[in-house]
Amino acid sequence: MGGYIGATAVGLTTTAADVQGDITSTDTTPELILKNTTETDADGSRDGKITFKGEQSGGEESTLAQIQSSHDGTADDQKGDLIFKTNDGSDGASPTERLRIDSAGVTSVSGSLTLDNSGQSQSLVSVGGGSTNAALTLRGSTGSAYAWQISSNAHVASALEFTRSSAVGNTTFSSPKLILDNDGLKFNGDTAAANALNDYEEGTFNVTLTTAGGSVTLNSVYNTMSYTKIGRQVTIFGLIITSAVSSPTGAYAHIDTLPFTSVNLTEGSGRSGGGVFWWDGSNAHVKPWEISEGATRLSIYIDATTITAGDDFYFSCTYQTA
């Protein structure tokens, strides 16, 4: 049997009204109005609730869920919240808040948020976590692919982690594939600070070429080189051309303006070396180069007396920085 409220408004002024069956409102602008008559500006006051109850198999009455509106803030204004609550199984008559929309339109979710488009060939996204971490989980709705989780503080303190599920179709996450923390980027569950990738940089630097005696002047249009730094590895590139020489002597020619100081390790394990292409105007040569530990100098093994104006030197040299 259903109760019916037609075009004429019906006011229920008793503290409790027991309406059996369904309630239907038929009108051009039907609405349900709940008015709290307490005059107050307290936060959470002026509230009104719709409570959903049911009976268990043993006849016990359960409060399953509530929808509540209340005042947002403490000012004498009209701001309101809309709050949704559900019973977690042991809440009794006081369900737990799960979602709140405040007066600014900000939606807050307590617990996990799941967007499920199963059967639509789309993805399932869930947002959740514990008291100290938050997680975003992405997985296919068919269970035929690995799931991925982006989380904070899940395995490493103060870190953002990217973790793949342990198997196809499940959401068990153990060892992160990528960790981002104060040390930099770490891979495949490695948490060692020394193994973090902490820098990427590109730039240019001006070059001078010096010898033990005399001098070598570079063409001002060809005295700039470039570099790329990835973590501790630095690679320099470029072409420099001499424009004038004044009785250069010695067994080396030096570039003393490397963009970063080389690493200083034991037993020479931080040294770098290779070959520099040299065009003397008539012939091509390859001359050895080396960078010692803790230095900003690159040394080319060349008889300085053989360097002439108009010589070309091409570089592609890699070394480790500290």
Image (cartoon, rainbow, N blue to C red):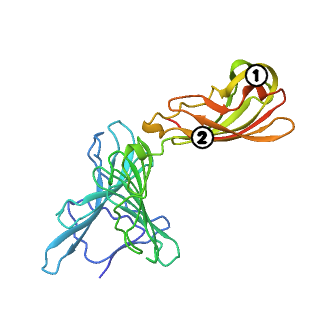
Q: Image point 46% across, 69% down: which residue? A: 27
Question: Which residue does the numbered mark 2 point to in the structure image?
Answer: 273
The total number of labels drawn is 2
Which circle marks residue 216 in the picture?
1
Whether residue 209 appears in this view of the structure is no
Sequence-wise, which precedes: disc 1 or disc 2? 1
Q: CA distance from mark 1 to mark 2?
A: 23 Å
Position above or below: 65 against 248: below
Q: Image point 20% across, 63% down: which residue? A: 16
* Rendering coords of residue 221 (x, y %): 81, 28
Secondary structure of residue under mark 1 = strand
**Residue 260 located left or right of residue 225:** left
Q: Which quadrant holds residue 311?
A: top right
Secondary structure of residue under mark 2 = strand
Question: Which of the pair 45/138 is nearer the observer?
Answer: 138
Three-letter amino acid code at disc 1? Val
